[in-house]
Amino acid sequence: MKNPISHRLLWLCVAIAFCSLKLSAQLDVIQTENGLVSGYKSGDISIFKGIPFAAPPVGDLRWKAPQPVKNWTGVLKCDKFSASPMQRKPVPFMMWTEEFITPPEKLSEDCLYLNIWTPAKSVKEKLSVFVWIYGGGFSSGSAACAVYDGEEMSKKGVVFVSINYRVGVLGFLAHPELSRESENKISGNYGLLDMVVALTWIKKNIESFGGDPLKVTIAGQSAGSMSVCVLVASPLARGLFRGAIAESGGILGSRLNRNFSEAEKAGLTFMDKMKAANIAELRNKSAEELIDAGGNFGLVADGYVIPNDVFAAFKDDQFNDVFMMAGWVTGDGSLMGTQTMTPEKYKQQAVEKYGDKAEEYMKIFPGSSSDQVASSLKELSLMQFVALPAHLWAGFSKSKAYIYQFGHVPVDKPGFPNYGAFHTSEVPFALHTLHLWKRPWREVDFAVEKTMSDYWVNFVKTGNPNGEGLSEWSVYDKSSGNIMEFGDKSKLSPGLHKGEFDFLEKTFKQ
């Protein structure tokens, strides 16, 4: 005769196991507003790759604002990255090895998809959400780059989302005929509209993935950082996020240098170059033809997506005031190229530009030798490109602001030149993806990675980067000038670059 206690115990164990399986599988198939999606598991993390957030911008939808996704029946399998946006064939160069580069195997205009990593076991968890926007000079980039993987950040208790957006001529062409087509009588900035629609999709759907639509932080690097700043300035993005992280890029400076009229004229010139009579003929050209034709396409102050005068929008408090973190890499100043100039010419230019303030300028950016001139020009480039925009934004912000400088030098790989702390090198440290960057890492590198990613996750969760086991990172204001320096160790440096900021802000002209 069977032991009834053992029999009941067996069934109890089976029931517990079944319930545990059911709980862990709750997020395997998700109902979105357009249909069911399935993902896959990596340990405790549920992963969904290639979820459509807008209709494919192809055919007549090329150079139009992103359109709604068509509903589907059945379960859409989302276990692979979608195609990356059309761009020139990605090739590693200089310090940017394959880990930082768009996977070259799959490029397409049909690219408006996003990816989600979530640790949630239940849709009721309402975790904070981190949305990553890639860089690439608005001419390249992809959410599928290896160093943008979201699994490790997700293990720290946040929902990680990465999004694609259109780049280059397909993402930013402005033209009078396109403006006439538009309901809002503008053109260009399609890549930015992609971001707005992706954030709108997240707001509507992220709760089903265990996220909280009211606790979204957007983050990006380089062009992605500039995009973050634009979204902070844009009335179209109001209410879509509560925090912003801008890494190595800003718009409160000289980086946004094309107004709408100039952009439309550039579009006319491009059409002539393509020997097209109208937009219909241009839409019939292949994406490859358009990209191979070259051209410089990027952000446009159109008065709709981006205010006509971004600086005035911030100054007049007409921006989305959210928790902010901004910073730069010490090597960002080299991104504009190395400048050479004799000390005599350097002093002459200082007098021409700053007049009676030239002597003050020369004390802050000295140039008594050729080496000193080169160093000062590099520092000035760093200030104007990334540091001053962050400083100005923090000054306008009523919410808490945190500023950092990254100077940690990644360990050399045998046969790999030492590029120092270079543009983009902080990303794998902040996103906890060093294991996907093929180098012989040291303990100090992993320590910097843990520190940075912990600060980033804390900021996403609370709007404050501080937490247990971390050095105190004080709020930034102009009087204290608190800047967190990430070297081999992290340290708070009050007044870092204060002289440069005071002078440049005093002489700043938008």
Image (cartoon, helix red, strand yellow):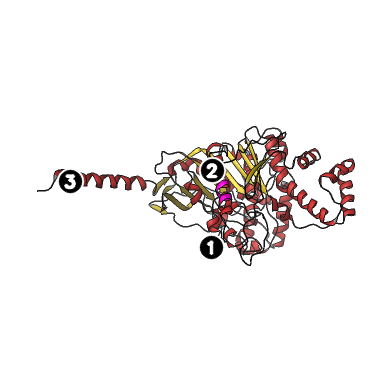
- Nearer the observer: mark 2 or 1; the answer is 2
Question: Marks 2 and 1, how far apart in space?
Answer: 31 Å
Task: Determine the residue located farthest toward the bottom in the rendered image.
Answer: 415
Q: What element carries label 3?
A: helix
Residue at image position (44%, 42%) is: 210
Amino acid type for the residue under numbered disc 1: Lys
What residue sits right under mark 3 in the picture? 6
Q: In which quarter of the image is the C terminus?
A: top right
**Dot 1 crowding, Cα within 10 Å, few <14, some 14–19, many 20+:** some
Foreground residue, 71 or 426? 426
Q: Is there a contact, CB below 8 Å, between mark 1 and mark 3?
A: no
What residue sits right under mark 1 in the picture? 106
Q: Give the range drawn in magenta.
A: 447-451
Residue at image position (87%, 41%) is: 357
Amino acid type for the residue under numbered disc 2: Val
The first of marks 2 and 1 along the sequence is 1
Question: Marks 1 and 3, how far apart in space?
Answer: 57 Å
Q: Is mark 1 on a helix, strand or loop?
A: loop
**Dot 2 crowding, Cα within 10 Å, few <14, some 14–19, many 20+:** many
Q: 415 above or below 170?
A: below
Secondary structure that dominates the magenta span? helix
Foreground residue, 265 or 164? 164
- Nearer the observer: mark 3 or 2; the answer is 3
The first of marks 3 and 2 along the sequence is 3
Check residue 457 in the rendering and tell me which mark sits there, or answer none.
2
Residue 462: quarter of image? top right
Give percent across and percent down for residue 356.
90, 41
